[in-house]
């Protein structure tokens, strides 16, 4: 009979994911030598090598790749048992792994964390901020319980709950204050600053401007909304940002902010989780904390965060 532990399987999964002993050890909160010992013991127990090791790289063997797929299934089933037990308990406690996209996280999380701490004092919130594609992958693999992002994602395996809609606003240098607000089509002829490839907000902005993903040479990319706004303040161009970002990103930049004429560009912000997650009722309560006043689901309770927008213009 082959005997190995769930802990060894988690260490194996971390190393298979990072392909680096140091990073895998950091992710598991143990020392690199301790991780190496556990992986070696697992291989000895199995009687088959799982990794090919060289001075510069680590890679899975053919058996290691097959083993990784089975390990993922085992660990996800184990996590589901834990979720089932949490759902059966009277309160909502333990760890909640929540993913959030970068164009939402800095502006929504402070209020959300305060709300969750007050509503569910026994809940330990683990936040993962990354782009949509990565969140969907980690949610599918069971490494996240839920994610807050732009809808729709149109994945049958996920429940999608719309939380609110918000406008995009135009950010221009201070010198443009009072000037007519251009339409989306007019932005095609301006130096438009957008987030780099991979951000869904970039695609939404391009769609409003009727631009393809291959932007003209004079358009520039940034890694964050903060970078884009500061570049605008320096007179380099103009940009679009979600309205929730205005109070944070424009307070130290010489910019003016305006809304577009109707129909204004908007996005739908929502929360998603796996349909198989037994914590669905509790996750809906978390979602209700994010809804504007009057939009909570009946009987869910909890005080909503008060506002999803900021005053703009002028």
Image (tube, grey):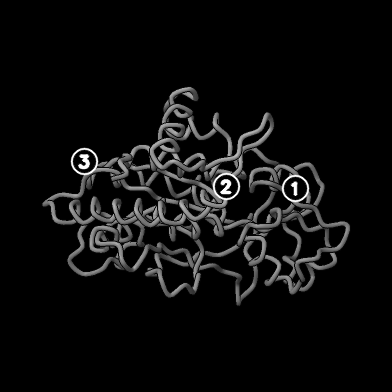
- Residue 272 locus on image (x, y percent): 40, 63
Indicate which disc, 2 or 3, sits on the residue closer to the N terminus.
2
Tell me the residue at 48%/43% (across/down).
48
Relative to residue 203, is residue 106 drawn left or right? Answer: left
Q: Residue 61 carries which label?
A: 2
Task: Please state which of the two labelled residues, at mark 1 or mark 2, is closer to the viewer.
Answer: 2
- 202 on left or right of 4: right
Q: In which quarter of the image is the C terminus?
A: bottom right
- Residue nearer the viewer, 226 or 234: 226
Label 1 close to label 3 by CB (< 8 Å)? no
Secondary-structure class at tag 1: helix
Q: Which of 39 and 215 is in front in this view?
A: 39
Q: How far apart, in angstroms, are the residues tagged by discs 1 and 3?
A: 43 Å
Q: How far from the left and from the top, in percent, is residue 142?
A: 39, 55
Residue furthest right in the image: 217
Q: Which residue lies furthest to the left in this view?
A: 90
Q: Residues within 10 Å of mark 1 (few under 14, many from 20)?
A: many
First in sequence: mark 1 or mark 3?
3
Q: For the residue labelled by badge 2, is the local secondary structure a helix, a strand or a loop? A: loop
Secondary element type, mark 3: loop
The circle drawn on residue 122 is 3
């Amino acid at each position: 009979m082959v005997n190995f532990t769930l802990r060894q399987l988690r260490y194996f999964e971390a190393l298979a994911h990072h392909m680096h002993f140091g990073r895998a050890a950091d992710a598991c909160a143990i020392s690199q030598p301790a991780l190496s010992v556990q992986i070696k013991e697992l291989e000895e127990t199995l009687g088959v090598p799982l990794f090919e090791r060289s001075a510069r790289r680590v890679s899975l063997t053919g058996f290691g790749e097959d083993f990784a797929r089975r390990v993922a299934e085992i660990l996800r089933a184990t996590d589901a048992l834990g979720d089932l037990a949490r759902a059966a308990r009277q309160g909502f406690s333990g760890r909640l792994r929540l993913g959030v996209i970068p164009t939402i996280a800095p502006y929504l999380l402070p209020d959300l964390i305060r709300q969750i701490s007050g509503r569910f004092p026994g809940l330990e919130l683990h936040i993962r901020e990354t782009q949509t594609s990565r969140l969907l992958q980690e949610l599918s693999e069971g490494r996240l319980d839920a994610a807050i992002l732009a809808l729709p994602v149109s994945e049958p395996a996920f429940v999608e709950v719309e939380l609110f809609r918000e406008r995009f606003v135009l950010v221009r240098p201070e010198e443009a204050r009072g000037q007519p607000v251009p339409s989306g089509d007019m932005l095609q002829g301006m130096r438009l600053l957008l987030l780099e490839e991979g951000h869904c907000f970039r695609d939404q902005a391009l769609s409003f401007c009727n631009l393809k993903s291959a932007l003209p040479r004079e358009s520039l990319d940034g890694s964050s909304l903060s970078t884009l706004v500061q570049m605008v303040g320096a007179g380099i161009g103009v940009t679009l940002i979600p309205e929730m970002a205005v109070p944070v990103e424009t307070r130290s930049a010489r910019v003016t902010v305006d809304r577009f004429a109707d129909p204004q560009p908007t996005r739908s912000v929502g929360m998603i989780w796996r349909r198989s997650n037994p914590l669905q009722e509790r996750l809906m309560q978390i979602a209700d904390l994010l809804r504007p006043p009057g939009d909570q689901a009946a009987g869910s309770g909890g005080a909503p965060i008060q506002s999803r927008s900021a005053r703009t213009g002028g």
